[in-house]
Amino acid sequence: METNNRVLDLIIIGGGPGGLTAAIYALRAKLDMLLIEKTGVGGQIALSDIVDNYPGLPGITGVDLMAKFEEQAKSFGLEIEYTDVEKVTDEGDHRLVKTTSGDFRAKTVIIASGAKPRKLGVPGENEFTGRGVSYCATCDGFFFREKNVAVIGGGDTAVKEALFLTKLVSKVSLVHRRDALRAEKIHQDQALDNPKIEMEWNSVLEEIKGDKKVSAVVVKDVKTGETKDIAVEGVFVFVGILPNSDLVDCDKDSGGFIITDEQMQTSIKGIFAVGDVRVKALRQVATAVGDGATAAFSAQGFVEDLG
Ligand code: NAP
């Protein structure tokens, strides 16, 4: 889309649940807008197997859910520019979005850039990424049919992905640094009841070993200090997320998550943030959707106030 020096009403950065919801609301409010996405719309949830807690669509897959979001946004005329955003700055009368394929200008910007998986930082992790180490079970689980794998972490992602992997692999060793999971209770119960999941409580990963491919993980019991090798061909790391927030220099918390008020306003006027990239208590599709609707409403008000 060629915008030249045209100043749009709104640019949304990111096409996950928050960004696409903001787009639906903004387009229905007749804002002149563009959504910028790096690769493909859908966000992290499109990598999820079954989304069983989004109301109204029980049992839907992440891919299908996000296809519905996209289709709905496109029915209101959504235009998407596929490029990489480098920086968003406040230029006084407008906001400037610098991308690898040129500059875009808008009165308001909604940052919906989401988050990426955090790495563990253990020996072997970088070396074996793509050769046994993965951050997405639905993407790579297929390669480990009837094999043993390790899943690292105790949050919703780790437990849900471990459950997904049990449909493919022989055994999942779930390595968690404490003696209690953080994930939703319903998923905890499913994992603890699953005969293919073996819990490695109070345990941390020390090293990922192998030759050309992963062959084992070295796990340390944090209570006894003892280490042991577990023979696995795959290691799935789910130890939290890092926000994609470097593109804007607004106020953030110590983890880099963007601080907003209840209107999704950041510390820079006219720049809003929604979904996983912002500081919030609960990161879910349902809460990202609420953020997106609120931010579009705030952006509309901001544009109207400019006259
Ligand atoms: P998370 O909730 O932050 O959990 C990260 C897990 O990794 C925790 O169990 C943590 O242990 C562990 N961990 C962190 N650093 C570690 C380290 N250095 N070594 C070993 N273990 C480490 O992250 P997430 O599971 O990726 O979820 C991100 C957000 O998305 C959360 O808000 C989550 O609720 C949401 N989500 C929801 C669903 C759903 O279906 N409801 C699905 C996926 C994600 P501790 O427990 O000891 O801190």
Image: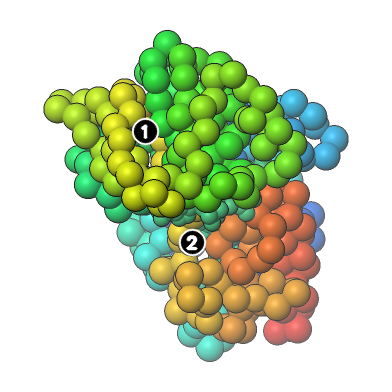
Query: In the image as oriented, which residue stretches furthest toward the right?
Result: 56
Circle 1 Cα neighbour tier, 10 Å, few/some/many (<14 / 14–19 / ≥20): many
Depth order, front residue of 139/105: 139
Q: Position of residue 186 (x, y in %)?
A: 74, 36
Q: CA distance from mark 2 to mark 1?
A: 23 Å
Q: Nearer the viewer, mark 2 or mark 1?
A: 1
Residue 183 x, y percent position in the rendering? 64, 45
Q: Nearer the viewer, residue 202 or 34?
A: 202
Q: Residues within 10 Å of mark 2 (few under 14, many from 20)?
A: some
| Residue 291 in sight in this render | yes
Which residue is labeled 2 in the image?
243
The chosen color scheme is rainbow
Q: Is residue 266 left or right of residue 201?
A: right
Q: Quadrant of residue 160?
A: top right
Name the residue type under label 2: Pro
Q: Hey, which quadrant is residue 46 in on the image?
A: top right
Please name the residue shown 53% across and 81% down the image: 251
**Where residue 235 is drawn, which disc sits there?**
1
- Secondary structure of residue under mark 1: strand
Residue drawn at x 43%, y 52% is 223
Q: Amino acid at mark 1?
A: Val
Q: Which mark is residue 215?
A: none
